[in-house]
Image: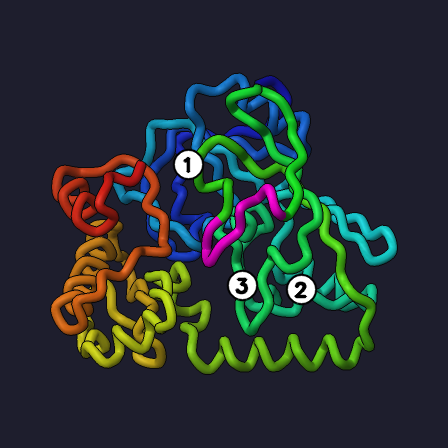
Amino acid sequence: MNNIECKENYEIKNLTSFKIGGLVEKIYFPKNQTEFLKLIRGLNNPIILGNCSNVLFSSQGCRRPIICTTKMCNIEFRGTKVLVDCGVKGPLLSQKAHENRLSGFEFMIGFPGSIGGNLFMNAGAHNQSISDTLTLACLYDKERDDIVYLSNKEMNFGYRQSILQTGRYIALGAEFDLKRENPEVIKGLMDRNLEFRKNIQPPLTYPNAGSVFKNPENDSAGRLLDKAGVKDYDFSRVAVWQKHANFIINKGEATSEDVLELMLLMQKKVKNTYTIELIPEIRYIGDMNKHEEEICQELYKKIQK
Protein backbone atom coordinates (compact mmCIF):
# COMPACT_ATOMS: atom_id res chain seq x y z
CA MET A 1 0.00 0.00 0.00
CA ASN A 2 2.96 2.26 -0.61
CA ASN A 3 2.23 5.93 -1.30
CA ILE A 4 -1.41 5.67 -0.19
CA GLU A 5 -2.12 7.87 2.85
CA CYS A 6 -2.53 5.76 5.98
CA LYS A 7 -2.94 6.61 9.66
CA GLU A 8 -2.46 4.12 12.49
CA ASN A 9 -4.26 4.00 15.84
CA TYR A 10 -6.56 6.73 14.59
CA GLU A 11 -9.36 8.09 16.78
CA ILE A 12 -12.31 7.62 14.43
CA LYS A 13 -14.62 9.93 16.39
CA ASN A 14 -12.72 12.81 14.76
CA LEU A 15 -14.38 11.83 11.47
CA THR A 16 -17.91 10.90 12.56
CA SER A 17 -20.74 13.42 12.80
CA PHE A 18 -21.75 11.74 16.09
CA LYS A 19 -18.26 12.40 17.52
CA ILE A 20 -18.30 8.86 18.86
CA GLY A 21 -15.83 6.06 18.15
CA GLY A 22 -12.65 4.48 19.46
CA LEU A 23 -9.28 3.74 17.91
CA VAL A 24 -8.97 2.00 14.55
CA GLU A 25 -5.74 0.15 13.84
CA LYS A 26 -5.35 1.46 10.30
CA ILE A 27 -7.34 3.90 8.16
CA TYR A 28 -6.51 4.63 4.52
CA PHE A 29 -7.41 7.71 2.46
CA PRO A 30 -7.27 6.92 -1.29
CA LYS A 31 -7.29 9.89 -3.67
CA ASN A 32 -8.56 8.13 -6.79
CA GLN A 33 -10.11 4.92 -8.12
CA THR A 34 -6.72 3.32 -8.77
CA GLU A 35 -5.68 3.69 -5.12
CA PHE A 36 -9.15 2.67 -3.94
CA LEU A 37 -9.13 -0.54 -5.97
CA LYS A 38 -5.61 -1.37 -4.80
CA LEU A 39 -6.81 -1.13 -1.19
CA ILE A 40 -9.99 -3.12 -1.77
CA ARG A 41 -8.03 -5.93 -3.41
CA GLY A 42 -5.10 -5.85 -1.00
CA LEU A 43 -6.74 -5.51 2.41
CA ASN A 44 -8.50 -8.22 4.39
CA ASN A 45 -12.23 -7.44 4.58
CA PRO A 46 -11.97 -3.63 4.84
CA ILE A 47 -14.79 -1.36 6.02
CA ILE A 48 -15.64 1.39 3.54
CA LEU A 49 -16.63 4.77 4.97
CA GLY A 50 -17.58 8.06 3.35
CA ASN A 51 -18.32 11.20 5.32
CA CYS A 52 -19.33 9.15 8.40
CA SER A 53 -22.59 11.05 8.83
CA ASN A 54 -25.09 8.19 9.14
CA VAL A 55 -23.06 5.79 11.26
CA LEU A 56 -22.59 4.94 14.90
CA PHE A 57 -19.00 3.83 15.36
CA SER A 58 -18.08 1.56 18.25
CA SER A 59 -16.36 3.12 21.24
CA GLN A 60 -14.34 -0.12 21.33
CA GLY A 61 -12.84 0.88 17.99
CA CYS A 62 -12.20 -1.52 15.15
CA ARG A 63 -9.51 -4.05 14.30
CA ARG A 64 -10.55 -4.33 10.66
CA PRO A 65 -8.85 -1.92 8.23
CA ILE A 66 -10.86 1.18 7.24
CA ILE A 67 -10.96 2.87 3.85
CA CYS A 68 -12.24 6.46 3.95
CA THR A 69 -13.21 7.97 0.57
CA THR A 70 -13.35 11.66 1.53
CA LYS A 71 -10.34 12.52 -0.64
CA MET A 72 -11.94 11.03 -3.76
CA CYS A 73 -13.67 14.26 -4.67
CA ASN A 74 -13.52 14.93 -8.43
CA ILE A 75 -16.53 16.60 -10.08
CA GLU A 76 -16.88 17.00 -13.85
CA PHE A 77 -19.71 18.76 -15.68
CA ARG A 78 -20.52 17.85 -19.28
CA GLY A 79 -23.55 19.86 -20.31
CA THR A 80 -26.40 18.62 -18.12
CA LYS A 81 -24.46 15.50 -17.14
CA VAL A 82 -22.35 15.38 -13.97
CA LEU A 83 -19.64 12.80 -13.24
CA VAL A 84 -18.57 12.51 -9.61
CA ASP A 85 -16.34 10.41 -7.37
CA CYS A 86 -17.92 8.51 -4.48
CA GLY A 87 -16.30 10.74 -1.86
CA VAL A 88 -17.83 14.03 -3.07
CA LYS A 89 -19.91 15.67 -0.33
CA GLY A 90 -23.57 16.30 -1.09
CA PRO A 91 -23.68 19.99 -0.08
CA LEU A 92 -20.67 20.80 -2.29
CA LEU A 93 -22.25 19.01 -5.26
CA SER A 94 -25.50 20.86 -4.67
CA GLN A 95 -23.67 24.19 -4.74
CA LYS A 96 -21.66 23.28 -7.85
CA ALA A 97 -24.84 22.26 -9.68
CA HIS A 98 -26.38 25.62 -8.77
CA GLU A 99 -23.33 27.44 -10.14
CA ASN A 100 -23.80 25.52 -13.40
CA ARG A 101 -27.54 26.35 -13.55
CA LEU A 102 -28.53 22.72 -13.02
CA SER A 103 -31.43 21.46 -10.90
CA GLY A 104 -31.89 18.10 -9.19
CA PHE A 105 -29.46 18.25 -6.29
CA GLU A 106 -31.19 20.93 -4.19
CA PHE A 107 -32.19 18.34 -1.56
CA MET A 108 -28.53 17.56 -0.79
CA ILE A 109 -27.65 21.09 0.37
CA GLY A 110 -28.29 20.10 3.99
CA PHE A 111 -26.98 16.53 3.77
CA PRO A 112 -23.56 15.99 5.36
CA GLY A 113 -23.11 12.67 3.55
CA SER A 114 -21.01 11.70 0.54
CA ILE A 115 -22.28 10.49 -2.84
CA GLY A 116 -21.26 6.91 -2.11
CA GLY A 117 -23.28 6.92 1.10
CA ASN A 118 -26.21 8.68 -0.59
CA LEU A 119 -26.27 6.01 -3.30
CA PHE A 120 -26.04 3.26 -0.69
CA MET A 121 -29.20 4.44 1.08
CA ASN A 122 -30.90 6.19 -1.86
CA ALA A 123 -30.89 9.42 0.12
CA GLY A 124 -33.70 11.86 -0.45
CA ALA A 125 -35.77 14.71 0.97
CA HIS A 126 -38.31 17.32 -0.14
CA ASN A 127 -39.68 15.17 -2.99
CA GLN A 128 -36.23 14.65 -4.49
CA SER A 129 -33.89 11.66 -4.21
CA ILE A 130 -30.55 10.69 -5.65
CA SER A 131 -32.21 7.97 -7.73
CA ASP A 132 -34.21 10.62 -9.65
CA THR A 133 -31.18 11.81 -11.63
CA LEU A 134 -28.73 8.88 -11.61
CA THR A 135 -28.02 7.50 -15.08
CA LEU A 136 -25.04 5.24 -14.40
CA ALA A 137 -23.24 3.98 -11.29
CA CYS A 138 -19.59 2.94 -11.41
CA LEU A 139 -19.16 0.08 -8.95
CA TYR A 140 -16.60 -2.49 -7.88
CA ASP A 141 -18.09 -5.98 -8.11
CA LYS A 142 -16.55 -8.18 -5.41
CA GLU A 143 -17.67 -11.42 -7.04
CA ARG A 144 -16.16 -10.56 -10.43
CA ASP A 145 -13.23 -8.58 -8.97
CA ASP A 146 -13.85 -5.95 -11.61
CA ILE A 147 -15.41 -2.55 -12.28
CA VAL A 148 -19.00 -2.68 -13.55
CA TYR A 149 -21.48 -0.01 -14.64
CA LEU A 150 -25.11 -0.34 -13.57
CA SER A 151 -28.04 1.66 -14.91
CA ASN A 152 -30.60 3.36 -12.71
CA LYS A 153 -32.95 0.39 -13.05
CA GLU A 154 -30.21 -2.10 -12.24
CA MET A 155 -29.46 -0.27 -8.97
CA ASN A 156 -32.76 -1.62 -7.54
CA PHE A 157 -33.57 1.65 -5.81
CA GLY A 158 -36.34 1.75 -3.23
CA TYR A 159 -37.10 3.80 -0.14
CA ARG A 160 -33.71 4.05 1.59
CA GLN A 161 -32.62 1.02 -0.42
CA SER A 162 -30.24 0.16 -3.25
CA ILE A 163 -28.36 -2.83 -4.62
CA LEU A 164 -25.30 -1.61 -2.68
CA GLN A 165 -26.88 -2.93 0.51
CA THR A 166 -26.49 -6.52 -0.70
CA GLY A 167 -22.76 -6.22 0.04
CA ARG A 168 -21.66 -7.37 -3.40
CA TYR A 169 -20.86 -3.91 -4.77
CA ILE A 170 -18.86 -0.86 -3.65
CA ALA A 171 -19.60 2.57 -5.11
CA LEU A 172 -16.69 4.21 -6.96
CA GLY A 173 -18.49 7.01 -8.75
CA ALA A 174 -21.63 7.96 -10.63
CA GLU A 175 -23.07 9.87 -13.55
CA PHE A 176 -26.18 12.04 -13.21
CA ASP A 177 -28.34 13.91 -15.71
CA LEU A 178 -29.77 17.14 -14.33
CA LYS A 179 -32.13 19.78 -15.75
CA ARG A 180 -31.41 23.34 -16.80
CA GLU A 181 -33.09 25.85 -14.51
CA ASN A 182 -33.03 29.50 -13.52
CA PRO A 183 -30.36 29.90 -10.80
CA GLU A 184 -32.76 31.95 -8.68
CA VAL A 185 -35.28 29.10 -8.70
CA ILE A 186 -32.55 26.63 -7.70
CA LYS A 187 -31.30 28.95 -4.94
CA GLY A 188 -34.85 29.37 -3.64
CA LEU A 189 -35.27 25.60 -3.30
CA MET A 190 -31.89 25.26 -1.59
CA ASP A 191 -32.68 28.05 0.87
CA ARG A 192 -36.07 26.53 1.75
CA ASN A 193 -34.48 23.13 2.28
CA LEU A 194 -31.82 24.61 4.56
CA GLU A 195 -34.39 26.58 6.54
CA PHE A 196 -36.54 23.47 6.99
CA ARG A 197 -33.59 21.43 8.25
CA LYS A 198 -32.48 24.27 10.51
CA ASN A 199 -35.90 24.34 12.16
CA ILE A 200 -36.13 20.62 12.93
CA GLN A 201 -32.62 19.18 13.00
CA PRO A 202 -29.93 19.63 15.65
CA PRO A 203 -27.20 22.19 14.86
CA LEU A 204 -23.57 21.12 14.52
CA THR A 205 -23.01 22.02 18.16
CA TYR A 206 -25.06 18.89 19.01
CA PRO A 207 -23.30 15.95 17.33
CA ASN A 208 -25.76 13.48 15.77
CA ALA A 209 -26.01 10.96 12.94
CA GLY A 210 -29.19 12.18 11.27
CA SER A 211 -32.44 10.23 11.30
CA VAL A 212 -32.29 7.33 13.73
CA PHE A 213 -35.06 5.20 12.21
CA LYS A 214 -36.49 4.74 8.73
CA ASN A 215 -40.04 5.91 8.09
CA PRO A 216 -42.48 2.98 8.06
CA GLU A 217 -44.70 2.71 4.99
CA ASN A 218 -47.23 5.55 4.80
CA ASP A 219 -46.13 7.02 8.12
CA SER A 220 -43.38 9.04 9.78
CA ALA A 221 -40.95 7.65 12.34
CA GLY A 222 -40.66 11.11 13.87
CA ARG A 223 -44.43 11.38 14.33
CA LEU A 224 -44.69 7.93 15.92
CA LEU A 225 -41.76 8.60 18.25
CA ASP A 226 -43.15 12.00 19.22
CA LYS A 227 -46.64 10.66 19.98
CA ALA A 228 -45.13 7.77 21.93
CA GLY A 229 -43.44 10.30 24.22
CA VAL A 230 -39.76 9.61 23.61
CA LYS A 231 -38.83 13.30 23.81
CA ASP A 232 -38.81 12.76 27.56
CA TYR A 233 -35.70 10.58 27.15
CA ASP A 234 -32.93 12.89 28.29
CA PHE A 235 -29.91 11.30 29.94
CA SER A 236 -26.53 12.55 31.13
CA ARG A 237 -24.69 11.94 27.84
CA VAL A 238 -27.40 11.37 25.22
CA ALA A 239 -30.90 12.69 24.59
CA VAL A 240 -33.71 12.71 22.06
CA TRP A 241 -33.74 16.05 20.22
CA GLN A 242 -36.64 18.20 21.44
CA LYS A 243 -37.55 19.62 18.02
CA HIS A 244 -37.73 16.25 16.23
CA ALA A 245 -38.05 12.90 18.00
CA ASN A 246 -36.15 10.93 15.32
CA PHE A 247 -32.79 12.42 16.29
CA ILE A 248 -30.39 11.48 19.08
CA ILE A 249 -27.80 14.02 20.20
CA ASN A 250 -24.46 13.45 21.88
CA LYS A 251 -24.48 15.80 24.87
CA GLY A 252 -20.80 15.16 25.47
CA GLU A 253 -18.56 12.11 25.91
CA ALA A 254 -21.34 9.73 24.86
CA THR A 255 -20.38 6.15 24.02
CA SER A 256 -21.76 3.86 21.35
CA GLU A 257 -23.38 1.84 24.13
CA ASP A 258 -25.21 4.96 25.38
CA VAL A 259 -26.68 5.52 21.92
CA LEU A 260 -27.63 1.88 21.35
CA GLU A 261 -29.44 1.74 24.69
CA LEU A 262 -31.43 4.87 23.83
CA MET A 263 -32.24 3.56 20.34
CA LEU A 264 -33.61 0.36 21.87
CA LEU A 265 -35.73 2.32 24.35
CA MET A 266 -37.17 4.39 21.49
CA GLN A 267 -37.88 1.35 19.35
CA LYS A 268 -39.59 -0.49 22.22
CA LYS A 269 -41.72 2.53 23.13
CA VAL A 270 -43.16 2.77 19.62
CA LYS A 271 -43.66 -1.00 19.39
CA ASN A 272 -45.48 -1.10 22.71
CA THR A 273 -47.62 1.93 21.80
CA TYR A 274 -48.41 1.23 18.15
CA THR A 275 -47.26 -2.40 17.52
CA ILE A 276 -44.97 -0.95 14.84
CA GLU A 277 -41.32 -2.00 14.91
CA LEU A 278 -39.12 0.79 13.60
CA ILE A 279 -36.05 -0.16 11.57
CA PRO A 280 -32.80 1.68 12.35
CA GLU A 281 -31.43 3.93 9.62
CA ILE A 282 -28.13 4.46 11.45
CA ARG A 283 -25.49 1.82 10.67
CA TYR A 284 -23.46 0.42 13.57
CA ILE A 285 -19.80 -0.23 12.72
CA GLY A 286 -16.88 -1.70 14.65
CA ASP A 287 -16.10 -4.07 17.50
CA MET A 288 -18.71 -4.71 20.19
CA ASN A 289 -18.78 -5.54 23.85
CA LYS A 290 -21.19 -8.25 25.03
CA HIS A 291 -23.95 -5.83 26.00
CA GLU A 292 -23.78 -4.08 22.64
CA GLU A 293 -24.05 -7.45 20.86
CA GLU A 294 -27.21 -8.19 22.83
CA ILE A 295 -28.71 -4.79 22.02
CA CYS A 296 -27.88 -5.06 18.31
CA GLN A 297 -29.41 -8.54 18.14
CA GLU A 298 -32.70 -7.03 19.32
CA LEU A 299 -32.43 -3.64 17.63
CA TYR A 300 -31.32 -4.78 14.18
CA LYS A 301 -32.49 -8.41 14.45
CA LYS A 302 -28.93 -9.30 13.50
CA ILE A 303 -25.46 -8.25 14.65
CA GLN A 304 -24.09 -5.26 12.74
CA LYS A 305 -20.35 -5.39 12.11
Quarter of the picture containing the N terminus is top right
Pick the residue in front: 122 or 25: 122
Residue 171 part of the magenta-drawn span: no
Give the distance between the C-alpha atoms of the residues marked 3 and 2, in whole angstroms: 10 Å
**Amino acid marked by disc 1:** Tyr
Q: Say if 152 sits above or below 182 in the image.
A: above
Q: Position of residue 63 (x, y in %)?
A: 33, 28
Q: Say if 295 sits above or below 112 in the image.
A: above
Residue assigned mark 2: 105
Residue 36 lies left or right of residue 288; in this view the side is right
Q: Determine if residue 235 is in view.
A: no
Q: Residue at x 52, y 80 (%)?
A: 196
Give whichever of discs 1 and 3 has the lower sequence position.
Answer: 1
Residue assigned mark 1: 10
Q: Position of residue 264 (x, y in %)?
A: 18, 58
Q: Nearer the viewer, mark 2 or mark 1?
A: 2
Q: Residue at x 60, y 57 (%)?
A: 130
Residue assigned mark 3: 124
Residue 94: name its quadrant: bottom right
Q: Secondary structure at mark 1?
A: strand
**Amino acid marked by disc 2:** Phe
Q: Determine if residue 37 is in view.
A: yes
Pick the residue in front: 274 or 294: 274
Q: Which residues are magenta?
A: 153-161
Residue 270 lies left or right of residue 95; in this view the side is left
Q: Position of residue 113 (x, y in %)?
A: 53, 55
Q: Position of residue 19 (x, y in %)?
A: 38, 54
Quarter of the picture containing the C terminus is top left
Give whichever of discs 2 and 1 has the lower sequence position.
Answer: 1
- Is the magenta region chiefly helix, strand or loop? loop
